[in-house]
Every structure is written in C-alpha cells, then in structure tokens.
Image (cartoon, rainbow, N blue to C red):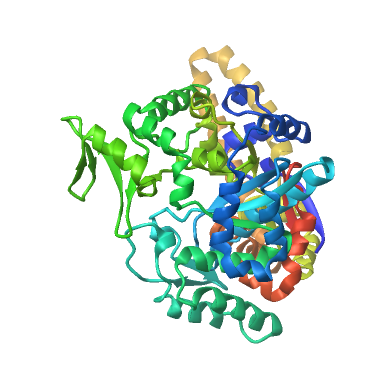
Amino acid sequence: MKATYIDYSDTNSFSKTLIAYLNNNEQLASFYGNRPTIAGFKDQINQKKKFSHRELLTQVLSDQYGDLLDSSPEVAQNIIRLKDENTYTITTGHQLNIFTGPLYFIFKIVTAIKLAQDLKEKYPEHDFVPVYWMATEDHDFEEINHTRAFGKKISWDVESHSATGRLSTQSIVDAVKQYCNTFGLSENATELTNLVEEAYLKGRNLADSTRVFVNSLFKQYGLIILDADRKELKKLFVPIMEEDILEEKSFKAIEKTSEELLEKGFATQVHAREINFFYLTDEFRERIVRTGDGRFEVLHQDIYFTEEELKKEIHNHPERFSPNVVMRPMYEEVILPNLAYIGGGAEIVYWLQLKANFDQYKVQFPILIPRNSALITDDQMAGKIFRLDFTFKSIFKSGETLKKEYVKRITKHRLNLQDEWMEFNAIFGKIKLRTHKIDPSLGPSTDAVKARLKKAINNLEKKLLKAEKRNHQDALIQVDRIKDKLFPNGGLQERSENFAELYLKHGPDLIPDLVKSFNPLDFKFTILY
C-alpha cells in the first residue's frame, strides 16, 4: 500500500486537548512527564531502571501462554528478554472486543510494535517489547459484545455481570458463524475463518480466546499479551490499594488536577471516586463505598467490612480488588517495566488527569503516545477523489462543503455576486447621504432597505449554486458515495469498521503494510491506498 500523511487538526476529528498536547502547548506541560520524542525516551529509560519485578512478571506470562509459546518463538524470546534489566515495554491496552471490534484496536497494537522497532534502532543497547494489556476485568459487556463487518452488526447475546475476561465462550458459536459468513469464498476468507474458529470455539474464556486470536495476528512481532487479573500481580499493588481505599488519596489528587485542566479551558474525560476499586468475584464486579458508620460496603451484594477486616481482605485476597479506569493505569505501571502508553484521543486526555496521582505514589509516569489513526482505501477510490480534483486532505470536509467547492471550481459561470453587491453598496452610500441631508431620521430606513437587498442577493447566490449543482448532479452523487464509503455513519472508518474486510483484500500482508507505514512519533494521520 502507498501512504500519505496529513495533520490531525486537518481531519476535524480530534479533541482540542489532544491537538494541544501534540502541539506542545505550554499550558499542558505540568500534566505529563517526558515528551513523546526520541530524546524524551532517553530520560524515561534512565528513570525506569529501578524496576524489580521481572522474574514474577515473566513467570506469570509463561503460565498464561502455556503451549501457545511453542508456536510463537518471537513471543517466547521477548518473555525471556523481560528478565533483562535493559528490556522495557511499550504498552497499549483495550477491552476484549469480540473479533477485535473496531479497526483502531488493530491500529493501537501496530503503533506499539512500530514504536518498539523505532526505539531499538535508536537505542540498540536496549530491547523494547510491545505489550497488549487486555482489559479483562472490565465488566461493561455491552461495549464489547458486538462488531460490524461489511455493514452488518454481529452480536454475542449472553448475560455477563462480572469481569468479561472470565466469561466462557461456549455460547459464542452463533456470533462466530454470522461473522465468518460475511467473508465470502477466497483463500484469505478460509484463513481468517480458521483463525477465528481456533480462537473462539475451543471452550476457552474470553481472555484466553482473545489472546489466541490476537497472537495469531501479531506473534511474528513478539507482541506480548497480558491478563493482569492475577493474584500474584495484584500483590504488588497492595500498598496502593490500601491507601486509595482507606485514605482516598487518588480522589483528592485527580479532582484537583481536573479542576486545573478545566480552568485552563481543557475538557476532562473521567471522574475519580472516593474509592477507585471494585470488589470482584466470578459472579459480580461491584463498587466499594464507605458507609456513614465507617464501614465499607460492596454495593448491591450485602457485603460489609470494618476497616480492619478490609485491610485483612486486601492482603489475603488482592485478586478480589479490581482497579477502575483511573487506577488501572497505575497498576499497569507498577507491574511492567514500561516506558510509554499508547492510547486513543480520549485515553490520552484522561491520562493527563492522572499525573499528580502518580507523583504522590512515586510511580513513574509513562510517555503518552496517541495511537496512529488511519484511513484505508484503494486505488479505485483514490482515482475517484483525484478525478473530482479533491485531495486526501480535502475529503475530511463535510459533503456539502465539498459539493460547493466542486461546483464553484468547475462552473463556467460566476456564482458569486459580491462584485455586484459592492456596486449596490456604493449606491446606498450616496442614497444615505442624500436622505440624511433631507431628514437625518431617515437613516435607519435606508439601512433597512439595504439589509433586505443584501439578504435577497444572498438568497439569489444560493439559488444560482443550487441550479448549477443540478447541472453537475452525477459528479455530486460521486461525492456522496465517496463520503459514505470512507466515513461510515459520518465518522472515521477506524471507529466503526472491523479489520476483516481489509484482511480479506490484503491477507497476511495487511499487518506488515501497517507496520511499515505507521510513524508513531510523527503524529500524522495516515492515509493508505
């Protein structure tokens, strides 16, 4: 595939806060650590050298992968590398969307892989391992139980009340069948069907199914897939769990940061709670709250702890305490030798709310890297765009704007009546002067007549444009088709489409093409065709 790049600001699809971060806005400087530059990574490496949980981390990973490592030598090698104090991780995370969900799921992981490669080239004395952190403890199943392929929504309808990673895939058979039936008949369709069925139809839970599927796509790059819902890893987080729940330190720090961001005119993305942990079992994941009498309640479960009982529970059963959206990032940085987090625009914004909390717990804050965003099309569509004399940059404008620009560019007639209006304006200047000499009070009446004429001329301009649009109706229909194809439901392709359609076209070359084309530290929107 060929690649071209445009500024994120030119897509009109990303938040003011994200654009300010990319532009190194001074007002945001206190809300993050090192800048996302090659030089910034040198400082980050020096600050992360004290990481001391490598043996435990590699043991957990080896146990989670099991026999899967036999067919994934690059992954096995990277797990071994994590024992070395000169090895660091580049992490992205996401929920367990079935069949990977929207296309940006793939883009996140590719960005992590490419950044690890780029850093190895710049700092050959170190190793950099890409990591996909599975959000296995998330319980919002309705966000992940569906995907869209070829315009069809495929859903997995089953009850889920606890961590999604623990959910059995026994009932996903119908969703797998619907998904694979959209592929048609081809060599790539057969290959993708085999990958899907191997991952999801072997009676695993959703976490393990996701690992198998994602590993089948990315194992050649040594991507490590981590499920942090493990007692051994949660033990490392016990001191912070205890302080957050008993002293509400995170709530105070994050609320203060959020207020500061709002005062500077930047939006916030998440709200901290007084207690930022859920109580987790195989049956439920519910918030922990402090009651009026000083006890701690697990909501909707009639479970209560005194302070001493809760301390004992945290130390004896840390696996029962599940971090929410504001504490998961800190958990990640505690258990990984991590240098950078790669996230979507909204994720980067809420990470900016967390810096002060990291500081008070003396946990190194990662470099924040917006994932690469991309639009993928083909030569046929590119040809249509260029024949209409548009560019890849211009197609991010609204359909109506594109139509107006096309008609004004292609028409042989002048549709703008501004020259005529300038003549009328001069005439009204003379009329107003004459009326003022006769009766100064007639000035407003003259202005009213002028305003009505201006409105009439504007309306006439619109009619001229509309009439000329009819003369070029075929071309304008092409504009609508281009917009509908490249921006499904009016949004970015990556936010709704699944990767399957692209995999069927490009096969195993899809991911290598993405890795080749993405440039994580350039911060440009990628267009591939």
For the point 77% across and 52% down, the residue is 409
The percent coordinates of residue 26 (x first, y second) are 65, 22
Give left or right: position of 161 versus 385. left
* Picture quarter with the N terminus: bottom right
For the point 66% across and 80% down, the residue is 191
In the rendered image of this protein, does residue 295 appear above or below residue 325?
above
In the rendered image of this protein, does residue 29 appear above or below residue 168?
above
The number of numbered badges drawn on the structure is 0
Q: Is residue 529 visible?
A: no
* Picture quarter with the C terminus: bottom right
Give left or right: position of 64 versus 167. right
Give left or right: position of 59 versus 86. left
The percent coordinates of residue 379 (x first, y second) are 79, 68
Which of the pair 471/217 is nearer the observer?
Answer: 217
Q: Is residue 214 visible?
A: yes
For the point 39% across and 49% down, the residue is 319
The percent coordinates of residue 376 (x first, y second) are 70, 62
Quarter of the rendering containing residue 80: bottom right
Give left or right: position of 474 versus 240. right
Which of the pair 233/184 is nearer the observer?
Answer: 233
The percent coordinates of residue 406 (x first, y second) are 73, 55
Which of the pair 493/113 is nearer the observer?
Answer: 113
